[in-house]
Image (cartoon, rainbow, N blue to C red):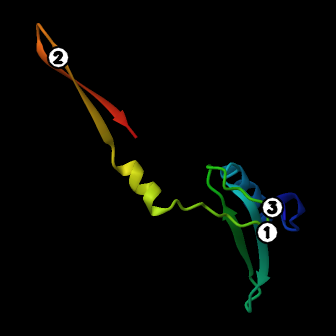
Amino acid sequence: MSYEASKSAVARSLMKDMFEQNMDKIYEASMREEISKDGDILKNVESSIGNLKGLKMKEGKRRIKRMKPLHEVRKKKTKKFNVQVEEIKSNGYKFTAESTV
C-alpha cells in the first residue's frame, strides 16, 4: 500500500515520512490499522528493508548467495611466492619475489 492510498491523514503522514527517510532502502512496505478493545486505533507499520548491495528482488524470488567450496576459500587465504635469485657482480645477490595466486 502506498501512502497516497491510505485512508487516514495520520497514517498517510507517517508513511510519507518513513518513505522519505528510507527511500533508498525500502522496497516493500505495508501499514495496518487495528481498533483495540478501548477504541484506540493502533497503527502497525511493516516494512522489508533491503540493503544497498543490490539484494532488492521481486516478490516470490529467493535471495541465494552462492557459497564457494572450501578449497576455493582456502586458495585465497594462502599466497605462494616464487623466489628468483639473480647474481649481480657489484652488489652481490639480488632477490626478487613474484607472487603467484
Between the residue at mark 2 and the residue at mark 1, the CA separation in whole angstroms equals 65 Å
On the image, numbered disc 2 is attached to which residue? 87
Is 99 on the left-hand or right-hand side of 62? left
Mark 3 surroundings within 10 Å by alpha-carbon count, few (fewer than 14), some (14 through 19), many (20 or more): some
Residue drawn at the location 76% of the way across and 66% of the way down: 61
Res. 89 image quadrant? top left
Secondary structure type for disc 2: strand
The kind of residue tagged 2 is Glu
Mark 2 surroundings within 10 Å by alpha-carbon count, few (fewer than 14), some (14 through 19), many (20 or more): few
Q: Nearer the viewer, mark 2 or mark 1?
A: 2
Mark 1 surroundings within 10 Å by alpha-carbon count, few (fewer than 14), some (14 through 19), many (20 or more): few
Instruction: Quarter of the image for the C terminus: give it.
Output: top left
Q: Are marks 3 and 1 in contact (CB under 8 Å)?
A: no
Q: Which mark is residue 12?
A: 3
Residue drawn at the location 40% of the way across and 51% of the way down: 75
Instruction: Indicate whether 5 appears above or below 86.
Output: below
Sequence-first tag of 2 and 1: 1
Outermost top residue: 90
